[in-house]
Image (spheres, rainbow, N blue to C red):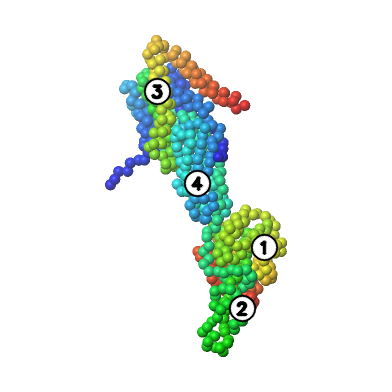
Amino acid sequence: MTPARIEWKPSRLVWRLAWFGVLGVGLAVVLGRPEPLVAAVPALLVVLLGLREAGQRPAAVRVSVDVVEPVAFEDDPVEVQVTVTSPVVLGEIAMELVASGLPGDVEDPGPRVTFGVADVTQTWTVRVHRWGRWTLGPLRLRVRTPSWGYVGSGQLMLSELTVFPPPARARDIAVPPSLLARVGSHAAQRSGPGVEFAGIRAYVPGDAVRRVNWQVSSRRGRSDDLFVNEYAAERAADVVAIVDTTTDVGPPGRSSLDESVRGAAAVVQAYLRYADRVGVVALSGRLRWLAPDIGMRQYYRIVEALLAARHDTSAFEPELARLPRQALPPGALAFVFTPLLDPHAIEAVRNLRERGHPVVVVDVLSGEPPVHRLPGDDRRRLADKQLGLRIWRLEREALLYGLQAIGVTILRWDPVTGIPLERVRLQPILRGTPTTRIPR
Amino acid sequence: MSVRWPGVRGWVRLGALGAGLGMVAMVPLSLPGDIPPEPALLVAGVAGLAVLAGGWFGTYVPLALTISIVSLGIAAAFDRPDLPSAAVIGLLACAYVLLAELADSCRGSSQVRGAEVRRWLRTVQGLMLFSVAGTVAVVLFVAVVDPTLTPIAGLVVLAPLVLLVVVLLVLRPIRRRNVGDR
């Protein structure tokens, strides 16, 4: 229960009737007639009765908020139940939930009015369109004393609502070339216990009899030679999602940071489903990182860590060298979500590649610098602007080509389908021959 | 073609307009027959427009009230209307302001139903009864109990007395509350 302080003042009704009454009394005195006075009497009596309720004005009312799902995904309906309790019966309790501090909508947003009660409960359905930690509200309160003599108003922010990026849309995943010695779901290039057929070899003492391939043994071998099936070992991988939070460009809700976090959440969820160890690094002035781990709990930990990225306004330069070994294990597959605008982020991508990580850069830049014709711009000025845009495009192409040349896979973020993970070809990268084209 | 009835908010607004137009209509009706009707009708028309505008825009309500009471004062200068008519005008003014305030309070709200309005009526019924009773008492006092009191003398005594009582009654609880705050 949060107390909401109420600021009281005489109501508009009282002022209007007082004006009518005083005017009537004044006219009666000036004209020397009783009729205006008689007309003014009811108004003055209502004013009198209304203002006598000064003792029935609570200094504060108690507000309790119950959010059915304090953690939700983008665009999920969230029910918010607000109860206002007053120590005395009030003439009116009106509540209005305004979503001014929230990138979302409130269904049926008008004020909810109740008359002659001491406590009232109202329920709103809220939909938030952007991930992040948001504060619900403000809740605007309007209360009146029973005879409507005084009107009070108050405002307070409600509880916090955590909105996660939407669930993963990545159906297929790229298997990292370097796998851990831990049992997982990816078929490794070495043989071991698994289910994926890898080849046939001669039987050696100790092999299980059920692995003997009798058909091959009877066809190819001598009577005392046996051949057994070999299976690919199933191993887990280390994956690190690196989110560039140094730059945030684009329209609200579809900005590069919004898409980066959505993409990182998709990658994290996709790999965690395969029992891989997944970590995260937020590449901003203040390096935030979470060491790779397994399980769906890790997903929520990672998203919680990313939610703080929006509010990071630190001016320090991000430096990957400061990261401990646990945050970026050797050989871990690195997914870098960046608009490739900040030189520090680009340098970080190169740094990762130099460390020997297979790197996939997801380009989340949604558009190009706009070329607008401003008032006063002549044809030459507009041509200069268009030339500037062409130079920007060329520089960007050169940058992408340079990154591919050092073995970085570059993918374009698709707002509809997400990350085209099925297009990732990691094996050629190990041999240093980048074959992945930039999907446009 | 089906008739679309107004919702609860519409009925409240219609009630406010009815009370306001009734208040305005009382003034020309109570004017003496020997004066030209055009000025009275003009004033009543302007007041009626203000009442209608006040039904949708609350800022016109004080204008309607001002025109009505001034018209009543002018009518009173011609020895009209009688005291009960003046009392009815005063009560209609109260009803008009209350209903206009209720209609304004319900604006934008989709939850106001008949039950809510009935609960509102319960909260203000004491107010209306008190004002009716008070008005009747004043009318009786002026017209019946003390008929010998000339209007001027009565007003010179009564009007400041009413104002003084009102001020005292209003200030007392406020002062008590301020002392308590300290």
Given the current orientation, which residue lies at the most extreme right position?
A322
Q: Do badges 1 and 4 share one subunit? A: yes
Query: What is the chain identity of the residue bearing mark 2?
Result: A
Distance in Å between CA atoms under marks 2 and 3:
108 Å
The residue carrying mark 4 is A80
Residue A275 tag number: none
- State whether residue A389 is above or below residue B106: below
Nearer the observer: mark 1 or 4; the answer is 1
Q: Earlier in the sequence, mark 4 or mark 2?
A: 4
Residue B132 tag number: 3
Residue at 43% x, 22% y is: A41
What is the secondary structure assignment of the residue under circle 2? loop
Distance in Å between CA atoms under marks 3 and 4:
44 Å
Residue A327 tag number: 1
Q: Amino acid at mark 1?
A: Ala
Q: Amino acid at mark 2?
A: Gly
Q: Do badges 1 and 2 share one subunit? A: yes
Question: Number of labelled discs?
Answer: 4
Distance in Å between CA atoms under marks 4 and 2:
64 Å
What is the secondary structure assignment of the residue under circle 4? strand
Asked if residue B168 lies left or right of residue B48, the reply is right
Query: What is the chain identity of the residue bearing mark 4?
Result: A
Q: Are marks 3 and 4 in contact (CB under 8 Å)?
A: no
Residue A113 in the image: x percent, y percent?
45, 39
Q: Nearer the viewer, residue A378 or A92?
A: A92
The residue carrying mark 2 is A206
Is residue A338 visible to the viewer in this orientation of the structure? no
Within 10 angstroms of label 3, few (less than 14), some, or many (20 or more) residues?
many
Residue at 56% x, 46% y is: A159
Within 10 angstroms of label 2, few (less than 14), some, or many (20 or more) residues?
few
